[in-house]
Image (cartoon, rainbow, N blue to C red):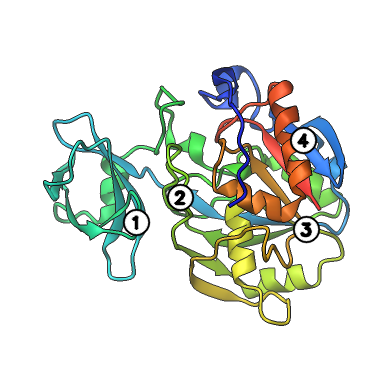
Amino acid sequence: MTVVDFVLPAALEAHEPPEARGLARDGVRMLVADGDTLSHHRFTDLPDVLRAGDVLVVNTSGTLPAAVPVRDTPFMVHFSTELDDGRWLVEPRGVASTTDRDLPLVGGATVHLDGPYAEGRLWVATIETPPPLSVREVLYAYGQPIRYGYVPDRWPLSAYQTVFETEPGSAEMPSAARPFTDRVVTRLVSRGVVFAPITLRTGVASAEAHERPYAERFAVPESTARLINQAAGRVIAIGTTVVRAVESAVGPDGRVTAKRGWTDLVITPEPGVRVIDGLLTGFHEPRASHLDMLAAIVDRSVLDRCYTEAIESGYLWHEFGDVNLLIR
């Protein structure tokens, strides 16, 4: 594991969307590391930073209102991932004990904890819903977006969606894409930058734990595989979810193929990445497992400089914060 350890000042935690801080979505700051060179920008500068022929691969998965209160308690159940057999992986969030395997939710659904999943926070659960509601209908009727302690106030589901969202399915927002707006996308396209979609349904990623990511459902379409394989410029992933999906679809010959299913790929500096040339991402917590992936994109020395510079320059962390563009 690549241990990137630092002290994150509380003042650098983004507690609300940039719109609540008087900024547009695309007005957040962007620290760019291109090779050994670091530079400071606003996200609206992205069309000037990229080149014609670059391919931006984006995640089209939308965010679910995946946190549902446990009835008559201050606790929540976070719905992470729907399994092939119809059951769900869930995190009983804040529940003092899981000795009671039946958790009644607000709205009448019940979560039956069938057993722990792997060695982490998640449980495999059977969800009993009040007829005629499906699990997803329960989420939309009684759920809210997952949020952690650094976001004290509730924000609408729209605050957790990206401009690329086409199909709900993620427990948490693919947040690296949040700063994109229609006007930035239009400017990028007019400059000759190409967009290519994938889908990866993100599971929960508790800010308090840094375990390896769980298996997630993904799809890389044929059109995207072709755009990546024929890229005239660099292939830049918009978020860690995209890196995981694309690198899961690389064949033995080093080319991307159309692929869908589940991926348990964990990307580290060894063996590294095979087709991704750059990554736009947020700033990650100290010792977070995602930092392993970042160290597979750029040298560890560059990564250390980025985080030192971000802290000294007052960049903001978490899903409502600023972004970091890493180019090999």
Measured in 3D between alpha carbons, the distance from the residue under mark 3 to the one under mark 2, in whole angstroms, is 25 Å
**Are dots 3 and 2 in contact, CB under 8 Å?**
no
Measured in 3D between alpha carbons, the distance from the residue under mark 1 to the one under mark 2, in whole angstroms, is 9 Å
Disc with the residue nearer the chain's start (3 vs 4):
3
Q: Which residue appears at 19% of the width and 38% of the height?
A: 70
> Hey, what amino acid is under mark 2?
Glu
Q: Which residue appears at 81% of the width and 35% of the height?
A: 45
> Hey, what amino acid is under mark 1?
Glu
Expressed as whole percent of the image width and height from the top left, the position of residue 16 reads: 52, 24
Residue ID for mark 4: 305
Disc with the residue nearer the chain's start (3 vs 2):
2
- Provide the secondary structure element on which disc 4 rests: helix
> Hey, what amino acid is under mark 4?
Arg
Tag of residue 119: 1
Graded by Cα atoms within 10 Å as few (under 14), some (14 to 19) or many (20 or more), the crowding at tag 1 reads: few
Left or right: residue 314 versus residue 100 is: right
Expressed as whole percent of the image width and height from the top left, the position of residue 229 reads: 77, 72
Tag of residue 211: 2
Left or right: residue 96 versus residue 91 is: left
> Hey, what amino acid is under mark 3?
Asp
- Provide the secondary structure element on which disc 3 rests: loop
Residue ID for mark 3: 277
User: Measured along the vertical axis of the image, is residue 308 above or below residue 68?
Assistant: above
Q: Residue furthest bottom?
A: 253
- The one nearer the camera, 109 or 285, is 285
- The one nearer the camera, 3 or 230, is 3
In the rendered image, which quarter is residue 273 located in? bottom right
**Are dots 1 and 2 in contact, CB under 8 Å?**
yes
